[in-house]
Image (cartoon, rainbow, N blue to C red):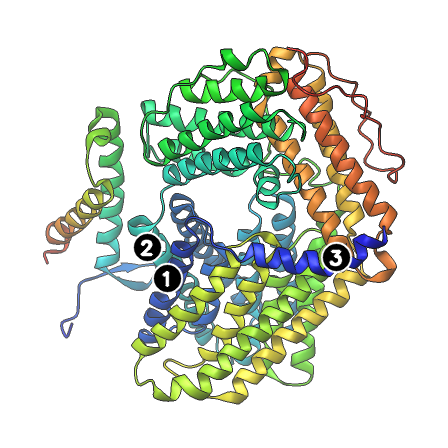
Amino acid sequence: MSERGPVIPFFGAYFPSWIACSLIGIFGSVIIRLIFIKAGIDAVMPLRVVVYLFLAIAIGLASSILLFGR
Amino acid sequence: MATIAESALRRKSHRLFDDLRPFPGRLRLSLSIGAICAISTVISMMYHFPEAAIGCYLVIFLMRANAAENVVTGIGIIVAVSLVVVLLIGIINLTIDHPPAQIAAIVLASFVFLYLDSATKAGEQAGIVALVIAFVLTLLGNIPLGEIATRAVLYAWAMVFVPMAVMAVYNLLFGISPQKLLRQTVAERLELAASRLERPESADDLAFMDALGEGMAESDKRLLLTKLLNLVYGRAYDFLERGQAHSYRLLLAVSAMPADAEGNSREELADICREMAEAVLQKKDLPDFSADRFEAIPVFANIARALDDLSHMAPLEKGAPVDDPAVSPDIFSNPVHLQFALKTTLAAVTCFFIYTAIDWQGIHTAMITCYVAALGTTGDTVHKLVLRITGCLIGAFFGLVAILFVIPQLESVGGLAFLVFAIVSLAAWVSTGNERISYGGVQIALAFLLTVLQGFGPSTDLSAAGDRIIGILLGNAVVYVIFTNIWPVSVGDEVRRRVGLATAKLKALAGLDFATRRASTALVASVQSDIGVIRNAVEMASYEPRHMRPSLEARGDYAARARALNDLSLALYFRPDPPPVPEPDPITSPAEPADFSNIAQPGETT
């Protein structure tokens, strides 16, 4: 917490990068869900909410490492 | 007629008792609302976001049983408020140095969004946007610097964002899914049909009438959401879609059954209903049932056929379409929308002027109350006023007791969260009830939260609590004066409008052949919900001020119209050769209700 996180300049204000990462995670898992529905995987999957939630977190964290290096 | 007046009080207290009874899911929903409010209070307190109370109020007001709907609403409001913030920063930059322009901006923004509230499906959501804009703009009068103003706008955004985000996430994880609610609805209808079959003489059974008057709009919305969000598909979706329509048809058939129908078959059918309800709840296959045996008994033929279709999940035939437009068709022609927007804006601005003129910022809740209180669109303003003031006083009482006895013992935000959770759950128990009482619950929570949540932690300031209660009462009084004196919408107007709508729908139905009419469950359901509104309106009539209250004869006439429309809709639905439908005529005052008494018992001919 003491360290300053990376920020993105946006319309003159500085937004913390975690907002961007969580948005990427949410949109990523929504897109993957659409693909899963087409492929029929969604219908047989147990605990759907939990799976997609963790998928979103995973994508968010991955994008944080890849895009912002932390 | 005198007996109606005498027994009115008794009947009302009886209804209040009925409305407070538990129903499946009510406890869970109330506790969820309490938990969401507690969580968002903690977040607001920790990050020092202002006005946690209004955020919690939004949750109480918007939260429904349907988890998918709550997620969509939460995200929708967040997006809308984000857009509004951009708009607001523009408005503030233009008006910050010109107080008159600020007032004009308040009036204009509030008018536009309240118009949308009245004339489109956006409804309450648009009203909330109006509330946020007007509230933020009135705060600007006290802020000397542009930059601080921008900060205030961002805080207002957070005030909405936090509770809505908590609501969306909570519902995603713990909410009740729409498919489960649909199963419950089907089972509940089967149970209601069973108890009506067992006791056909209890013709004014409140739960049965409510289920019938609710129509199919709510379940259709749930179906649509499960489809859009791909929550269930294939056979499971077919089951919900068909089960929902067939079970409503069963309710209609049971309501058309005469009270003196023969006993043995009734009990047999009731047992089958109960068996099916059990199977629906346990997600088992429905018990097999064949209508053949009952085909010979005309009064039961329709009930048996509905049960038959339900047990075999017969595919739905294509009936007449129900047009339920997103924008009401008379958006620019009907002056009611314009009047509603003007009245509410006037009430809000009046309160703003009152507390600015006497320089008493402490009662600024008056203005917020106007937006909250004016959300009712029917003529039962006074009924809601009674609920609001009682609710406000109960909530304020809880708040004062908490400030005097509980909060001094608290040391952290955690304890405050428990307090909020307990009282808001209690208020939510009332607000999740029927429309007859739900406003009372909303006000209990609002008054409690406004008195208790003042700073960023447990607070024991009594004078601020008093100010807020006075603010709520002032807001309610202003709304009452304005809504009963300027363009009052009487219960009679609402009845006439609904009679016109229902007659037009029945007219459309009458033009079709019998096979299509029989399949038009959705259209009949929408007529039934109009009739439900008329029945409720008749109840509300006794709350109107004396000079505009419909006479007892007029009320009896409204009730007769509701019965006539009901008989006609059942006849059109079940009989191959129904009586003619009268011309839709919403404008003239109700004369003699059309005589449908010569209608033969539905189901007599097949």
- Circle 2 is placed at which residue position? B170
From this view, report whether residue B209 is shown above or below residue B20: above
Q: Which residue is tagged 3?
A: B8
Question: Which is more toward the observer, B317 or B343?
Answer: B317
Q: Badge 3 sits on which subunit?
A: B
- Label 1, label 3: how many angstroms apart (C-alpha)? 38 Å
Q: Estimate how packed mark 1 is, as few (under 14), some (14 to 19) or many (20 or more) residues with alpha carbons within 10 Å.
A: many
Which element type, helix, strand or loop, lies under badge 2?
Answer: helix
**Image check: B343 left or right of A62?**
right
Report the residue at 79% width, 36% height from top: B561
Separation (CA) of disc 2 from disc 1: 7 Å
**Number of residues whose C-alpha sits closer than 10 Å to that of mark 2, classed few (under 14), some (14–19) or many (20 or more):** some
The numbered dot on residue B429 is none
Where does residue B315 sit, x and y in percent of width and height?
A: 45, 16
Is B231 above or below relative to B354? above
- Under mark 2, the amino acid is Tyr
Q: Nearer the viewer, mark 1 or mark 3?
A: 3
Amino acid type, callout 3 = Ala
Say which residue label 1 marks: B36
Point 63% across, 57% down: residue: B14
Of mark 3 and mark 2, the one earlier in the sequence is 3
Circle 3/circle 2 CB separation < 8 Å:
no
Report the front residue among B113 and A9.
B113
In this rendered view, identify the residue nearer to me: B87 or B166: B166
